[in-house]
Image (spheres, coloured by chain):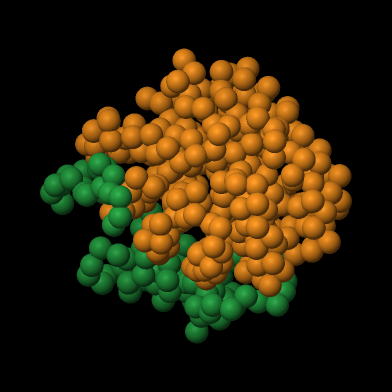
Amino acid sequence: MPDPHPLAGTPRRSRDQVADLHFMDARYKLLDLAAFLDRLERATGADDHRVRGLRQALPILLEGGDDRVAKILHLWSDPSLTPIEKADTKSASGVWPGLK
Amino acid sequence: MRYIEPHGHMVSRTTDDYQAMALAGCAAICEPAFWAGFDRKSADGFHDYFCQLTQHEPKRAAKYGLPHYCWLCINPKESEDMALAADVLALIPQFIGAPTVLGIGEIGLNKNTRNEMKILEQHIELAVKHDQLILVHTPHLEDKRKGTRLITDVLKAHPGVRPERVIIDHVEEHTIAGVLDQGFWAGITLYPESKATPVRAVDMLENFASQRVWLNSACDWGHSDPIAVPKAAAEMRRRGHAAAAIDSLVYGNPVRFLSQSKNFQDPQALR
């Protein structure tokens, strides 16, 4: 990385130290995600592209490496590189609608 | 602690927010021109908005001891209307000479359309012609990766653009490295939901921290937090980072970028 800042470089931390700082935060977020999936199960109709994208991202959580966030963001991104002719909305949905 | 809020849409915030920011250590606020949440119908609306940014808002901020600066543009969300955009672009030169204007921003793309691209190119041309800094908004969510690539390609192709005078804002884990590797500055925006949380931002900083990164809250009329930057600083402290490194990131880095504008004054030098 060019022009490194003094903050760069993760200080040596044990996994226990990381868990002490962030486990409860991750715990409640995982339970919230589980509750969301349960809520979907109790609802009617098919998954839309956002939920399909979310389900496709879940296996990435169990992969190795320290770049899961980037992998998920890439998965959900529009892969094209050409400007579109005209937009039919101003907003984004969170997952590229073309994701299969 | 002290920090700079380099990106806050204060016209949408209350005086309580100014007070909270001042109490949290904010030393200066910079406000890019933004979408109002609805499409303005004429350039007259932008004339009034630019007056608000350059004349009224600095007075409101001063009541809390905060220097207030601004950036001018028509936001990409309103760039689809080419006639309106042309009228607004024609207005900007009469405001560029105001003493608190830092540059052209936040320009960029929203849905990555051809019209948005044309207006982006015209904004870049305007900035180069008037020797202004550039602040770039990158698109939201699934449109960010493509939009960031389109924007950086356009900027790199312009011979008058110096990357060290451009900040590409709202980077996330999948775009930050590409922005920094091309010589631009990168802004990490702290949002409760749709951009980076303070915890993710500090992760990014530990992996990518550069002398060319800043943090901002981009607080506006939506779900956002005007004291997100000091909350990220608190996260750095609890992870054990040195006070001097934190200060260098939340104060020193924005001061170094913004000082490239003759209008910006280091708040420390004003005390």
Q: Is residue B269 above or below residue B233?
A: above
Q: In the depicted view, which residue is nearer to us: B136 or B64?
A: B136
Which quadrant is home to the N terminus of chain A?
bottom left
Which percent across, then down, holds residue A40? 51, 69
Which percent across, then down, holds residue B132? 60, 45
Answer with left or right where residue A3 lies relative to residue B109. left
Which percent across, then down, holds residue A54? 45, 70
User: Among all residues in the image, which is located at the extreme bottom?
Assistant: A100
Q: Tell me the residue at 86%/51% (across/down).
A: B42
Q: Is residue A41 visible?
A: no
Q: Quadrant of residue A86?
A: bottom right
The tally of labels here is 0
Which percent across, then down, holds residue B94? 77, 40
Answer with left or right where residue B29 lies relative to residue B244. right
Answer with left or right where residue B142 lies relative to residue B38. left
Q: Is residue A63 above or below residue B11?
A: below
Q: Quadrant of residue B241?
A: top left
Q: Is residue B95 visible?
A: yes
Any idea which chain is the green one in this picture? A
Q: Tell me the residue at 56%/49% (across/down).
A: B135
Q: Is residue A74 above or below residue A28?
A: below
- The colour of chain B is orange
Q: Tell me the residue at 49%/54% (across/down).
A: B162
Q: In the depicted view, which residue is nearer to us: B17 or B169?
A: B169
